[in-house]
């Protein structure tokens, strides 16, 4: 964490953006370089309103106006003042690099026995916020400042990772300070909670992890969250822990099912975590995270359903296909289990979700190809032929969403579904009546009561277990 530059006793921290390093103590002197907020320099003297400084990283000396710098001392008696500045800067957006620099100075100045988890908690929070700023869409000017601040933080020992998804780059803090907090017995429950949340972000998972590595990563995330001491936590932090646990456990249930393990406990605990959220304590930002947690749980919640078969004219039989593939056969049980049609998938087939229409001419089945994406397969008779079509949660590609069967209309010509997904503009949830002939949405609304027949003909099992009616 602490680079060589902090070993000097007479230091100055750049406090503004940007600052010119001049060849002489004059505003019109040639620039030796451009410095940014949070950079640390060695002070070698004073010339009027300028300080003579040396930049160890660039191996260059020069002059900077004293008003653009803040001199500091690394003597132990100065540590309380440095920590007070860290406390002021830690929650100030745009001052992350400056705050990290002061925190690094504090860790150098303070006696080891006096250092608590507070400084590591502050550094981790500022580094994480800086990474989020770097990931956001900004103007070229702001993006340049953020990039410079990332460079300053890197000079101070903070590491970042970048992941590309769908053409967008997500910058993530590597998390060393958070791990240090969790390793300290003196860390308070709030500090533990913030560290656990910082280490378990959904957006900061390496997209190149294979199934085994991803399963192990989600196991680790679940364990980290489980170990947090929740004694006396604020309602806000408790909600954020519950939301994160719900999403992590839902993903873990998916991977356990893929491995052939029992996923009931993970899926059930995910539902419990979602249900424990105090909705009246959610602010605007947390409302969005709550919707995300619900969609993640909704995608995998079928792992908590009992494996009950529904006898009738139509039945589903699973057969192995190519390596890693499952083939789904639709059978006519009234004619010697005659196979009507078949489709194969690399996803999880949730047999307990199979629901046939009253007239036996259609069947709905949930299939989950990804941990955060669940589709609906509709088997239907078209004349003398049978076919199977896939209804996705949305048309923007598999990312985060689910669609689930909610019931058959009495006429067996319509099925009720609910879709919930993340799309442009945020999260969307809608209840629909879909025509069986075309599989097109004929009516949709934000509440099932506005869809004719939905309340009357909805599936009882769906109503008792869905998260869409939260």
Image: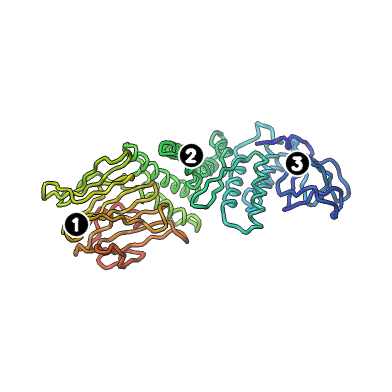
In the picture as drawn, the residue positioned furthest to the right comes out as: 48
Mark 1 element type:
strand
Q: Is residue 314 left or right of residue 202?
A: left
Mark 3 element type:
loop
Please tell me which of labels 2 and 3 falls first in the chain.
Answer: 3
In this view, the residue in front, 424 or 396, is: 396
Q: Nearer the viewer, mark 3 or mark 1?
A: 1
Mark 2 element type:
loop
Mark 3–mark 1 Cα distance, whole angstroms, equals 75 Å
Residue 345 position within the rendered picture, expressed as x and y whole percent measured from the top left: 31, 46
Mark 2–mark 3 Cα distance, whole angstroms, equals 45 Å
The 10 Å Cα crowd at callout 2, few under 14, some 14 to 19, many 20 or more, is some
Residue 462 position within the rendered picture, expressed as x and y whole percent measured from the top left: 27, 54
Which label belongs to residue 58?
3
User: Could you tell me which quadrant the C terminus lies in?
Assistant: bottom left
Q: Which residue position holds label 2? A: 229
In the picture as drawn, the residue positioned furthest to the left comes out as: 335
The 10 Å Cα crowd at callout 1, few under 14, some 14 to 19, many 20 or more, is few
Please tell me which of labels 2 and 1 falls first in the chain.
Answer: 2
Q: Which residue position holds label 1? A: 385
Please tell me which of labels 3 and 1 falls first in the chain.
Answer: 3
In this view, the residue in front, 376 or 102, is: 376
């Amino acid at each position: 964490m602490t680079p060589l530059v902090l070993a000097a006793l007479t230091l100055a921290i750049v406090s503004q953006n940007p600052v010119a390093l001049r060849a002489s103590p004059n505003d019109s002197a040639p620039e030796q370089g451009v410095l940014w907020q949070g950079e640390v320099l060695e002070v070698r003297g004073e010339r009027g309103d300028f300080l003579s400084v040396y930049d160890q990283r660039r191996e260059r000396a020069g002059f900077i106006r004293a008003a653009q710098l803040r001199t500091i001392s690394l003597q132990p008696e100065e540590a309380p003042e440095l920590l007070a500045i860290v406390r002021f800067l830690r929650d100030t957006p745009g001052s992350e690099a400056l705050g990290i620099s002061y925190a690094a100075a504090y860790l150098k100045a303070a006696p080891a026995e006096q250092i608590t988890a507070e400084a590591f908690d502050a550094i981790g929070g500022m580094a994480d916020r800086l990474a989020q700023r770097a990931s956001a869409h900004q103007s070229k000017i702001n993006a340049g400042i953020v990039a410079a601040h990332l460079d300053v933080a890197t000079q101070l020992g903070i590491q970042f990772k970048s992941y590309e998804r769908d053409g967008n780059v997500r910058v993530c803090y590597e998390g060393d300070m958070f791990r240090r907090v969790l390793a300290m017995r003196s860390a308070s429950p709030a500090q533990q909670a913030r560290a656990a949340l910082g280490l378990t972000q959904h957006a900061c998972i390496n997209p190149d992890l294979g199934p085994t590595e991803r399963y192990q990563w989600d196991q680790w995330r679940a364990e980290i969250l489980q170990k947090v001491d929740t004694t006396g936590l604020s309602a806000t932090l408790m909600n954020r822990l519950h939301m994160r646990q719900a999403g992590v456990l839902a993903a873990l249930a998916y991977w356990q099912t893929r491995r052939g393990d029992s996923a009931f406990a993970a899926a059930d605990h995910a539902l419990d975590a979602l249900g424990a959220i105090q909705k009246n304590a959610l602010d605007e930002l947390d409302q969005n995270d709550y919707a995300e947690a619900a969609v993640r749980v909704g995608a995998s919640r079928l792992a908590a359903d009992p494996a009950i078969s529904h006898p009738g004219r139509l039945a589903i039989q699973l057969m192995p296909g190519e390596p890693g593939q499952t083939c789904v056969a639709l059978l006519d049980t009234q004619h010697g289990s005659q196979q009507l049609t078949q489709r194969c998938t690399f996803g999880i087939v949730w047999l307990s979700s199979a629901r046939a229409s009253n007239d036996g001419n259609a069947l709905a089945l949930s299939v989950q190809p990804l941990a955060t994406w669940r589709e609906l397969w509709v088997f239907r008779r078209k004349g003398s032929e049978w076919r199977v079509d896939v209804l996705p949660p949305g048309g923007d590609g598999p990312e985060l969403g689910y669609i689930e069967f909610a019931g058959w209309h009495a006429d067996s010509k319509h099925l009720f579904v609910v879709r919930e997904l993340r799309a442009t503009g945020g999260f969307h949830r809608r209840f629909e009546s879909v025509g069986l002939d075309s599989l097109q949405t004929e009516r949709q609304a934000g509440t099932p009561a506005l869809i004719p027949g939905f309340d009357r003909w909805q599936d009882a099992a769906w109503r008792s277990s869905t998260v869409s009616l939260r």
